[in-house]
């Protein structure tokens, strides 16, 4: 049994039941469920789960407002938020991250990817569905100082910090690492990279670890951001 405690906030009964079954089968500890935003906010405050799966389209207060209220009331919370929704519009995605979401998946995600997303989110890494990643990376490519306003919520992505520019200069990426980094930016999984480059998944993972170390990045998304901002990938 995993020691990761999960809360489910989803208004559709069948979807919630399916999520609960998949998470329990993977060994996660489901500490509570809610079918609306009001109940979800109360659940998060009372249980303080490690990870909360939150739907955007809740019947009373939406998932984005729920996150904002929770973060405002519990600024030191260790609960990480994984948005799980049908909404993949640019407006919804950027508003969710601006509100404090840690990861974002569409409801079309398969069970194995969902389990990975929960684990990555619990470890403090942003897990972003490839469909969503393209939206985030489009914003990264915008000129410095620009932001995207979404109902008074603004998302701004900073350039790579000077210390990371120095790291990139001191520890340049190999040609193979640059190939893999470009595929990461394109939203490819390790398995997809393995298939495209005709190498094993284990080899891909080794290269990805090296890329993260060289870029001083905590996860693939942060590596992609720094790669684009530093000009490693155009």
Image (cartoon, rainbow, N blue to C red):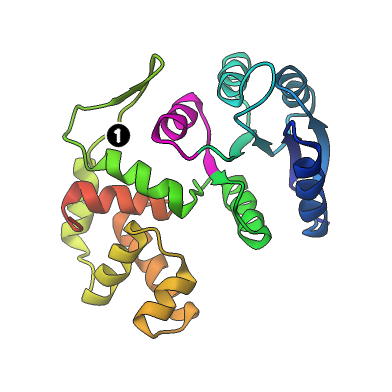
Q: Residue at x 49, y 79 (%)?
A: 202
Q: Position of residue 195 (x, y in %)?
A: 42, 80
Residue at x-position 60% and y-position 54%? 109
Of 36 and 40, the residue lying toward us = 36
| Crowd tier of the residue under label 1, counting other residues whose Cα lies within 10 Å: few below 14, some 14–19, many 20 or above | some
Q: As rendered, which of 199 and 35 lies closer to the eye?
A: 35
Looking at the picture, tell me which residue is in the foreground, 145 or 47. 145
- Look at the image and tell me in which quarter the N terminus lies: bottom right
Residue of label 1 = 157
Residue 120 against residue 92 in the figure, above or below: below
Name the spot of residue 78 as percent of width and height, x first: 63, 32
As for residue 99 lying within the magenta part, the answer is: yes
Instruction: Check residue 25 for magenta coloring.
Output: no
Would you say 117 lies left or right of 186 here? Answer: right
Measuring from the top left, give residue 28's x and y in whole percent: 78, 51
Magenta span = 88-104
| Residue 28 appears in view | no
Tell me what residue is drawn at x 29 percent, y 38 percent: 139
């Amino acid at each position: 049994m995993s020691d990761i405690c999960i809360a489910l906030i989803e208004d559709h009964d069948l979807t919630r039941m399916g999520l609960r079954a998949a998470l329990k089968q993977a060994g996660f500890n489901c500490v509570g469920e809610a079918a609306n935003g009001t109940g979800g906010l109360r659940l998060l405050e009372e249980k303080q789960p490690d990870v909360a799966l939150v739907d955007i389209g809740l019947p009373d207060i939406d998932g984005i407002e729920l996150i904002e209220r929770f973060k405002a009331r519990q600024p030191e919370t260790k609960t990480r938020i994984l948005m799980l929704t049908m909404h993949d519009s640019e407006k919804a995605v950027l508003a969710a991250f601006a509100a404090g979401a840690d990861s974002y998946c569409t409801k079309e995600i398969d069970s194995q990817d969902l389990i990975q997303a929960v684990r990555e989110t619990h470890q403090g890494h942003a897990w972003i569905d490839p469909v969503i990643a393209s939206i985030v990376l489009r914003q990264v490519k915008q000129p410095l100082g620009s932001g995207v306003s979404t109902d008074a919520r603004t998302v701004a992505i900073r350039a790579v910090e000077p210390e990371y520019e120095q790291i990139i200069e001191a520890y340049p990426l190999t040609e193979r690492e640059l190939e893999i980094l470009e595929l990461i930016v394109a939203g490819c999984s390790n398995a997809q990279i393995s298939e495209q480059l005709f190498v094993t998944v284990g080899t891909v993972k080794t290269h990805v670890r090296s890329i993260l170390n060289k870029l001083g990045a905590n996860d693939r998304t942060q590596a992609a951001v720094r790669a684009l901002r530093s000009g490693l990938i155009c």
